[in-house]
Image (cartoon, rainbow, N blue to C red):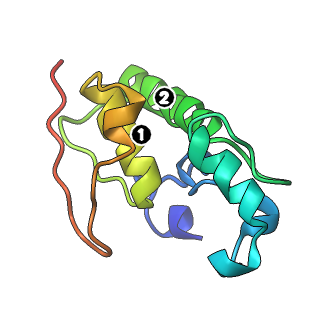
Amino acid sequence: MAEALDPQIRIDERLREINFGDWEGQPWDEIDRAAIDRWAADVLHFVPPGGESVASLQQRVIDFATALSATLDAPRVAIVSHAGVMRALFGHWHQLPASEWMQLKFDFASITEIEVAQ
């Protein structure tokens, strides 16, 4: 595990991508259209079967950010994660409403620097 190679590396489950449950890995055209419509009508709170809502993702990411700020002993930290997690972190740190942070774009395999005011 990475943590064994370098004690400064930490794996945190709160940074995993959103769990789409039964929808995971399925092509959009194979998911019930009515369910997708319900999700589109309330992206923040809709829970795919066996999955989690964006609000749940947001809460666990905020829990991570709170714990990070309480234990951070360096002025810089690198976070390797998925775009959904990065959107939620950016939104939290910049106090954006969900309607704004959910629309943020992060390129695949990109590096994004986020400055957080202390």
Which residue is depicted at the point 19% across and 30% down?
116
Q: Which mark, by number, is residue 63?
A: none
* Badge 1 element: helix
Question: Is residue 31 visible in this depiction of the protein?
Answer: yes
Which residue is depicted at the point 29% across and 26% down?
96
Where is mark 2, residue-wise? 62
Q: Which mark, by number, is residue 88?
A: 1
Whole-percent x and y of residue 65? 43, 30
Whole-percent x and y of residue 8? 40, 52
Which residue is depicted at the point 41% across and 31% down?
98
Q: In this view, does 81 lie above or below 40?
A: below
- Few, some or many residues within 10 Å of mark 1 (<14, 14–19, 20+): many
Q: Which quarter of the image is occupied by the C terminus? A: top left
Q: Is residue 54 left or right of residue 35?
A: left
**Residue 4 occupies quadrant:** bottom right
Whole-percent x and y of residue 87? 36, 46
* Badge 2 element: helix
Which residue is depicted at the point 41% across and 26% down?
71
- What's under tag 1, amino acid-wise? Ala
Q: Do the residues labelled 1 and 2 touch (CB within 8 Å)?
A: yes
Nearer to me, 63 or 41: 41
Q: Tally the marks.
A: 2
Q: Is residue 9 above or below residue 59?
A: below
Question: Is residue 9 visible in this depiction of the protein?
Answer: no
- Few, some or many residues within 10 Å of mark 2 (<14, 14–19, 20+): some
Whole-percent x and y of residue 63? 54, 27
- What's under tag 2, amino acid-wise? Ile
Rounded to the nearest angstrom, the CA distance separating label 1 from label 2 is 8 Å
Q: Is residue 18 left or right of residue 101?
A: right
Nearer to me, 107 or 48: 48
**Residue 41 occupies quadrant:** top right
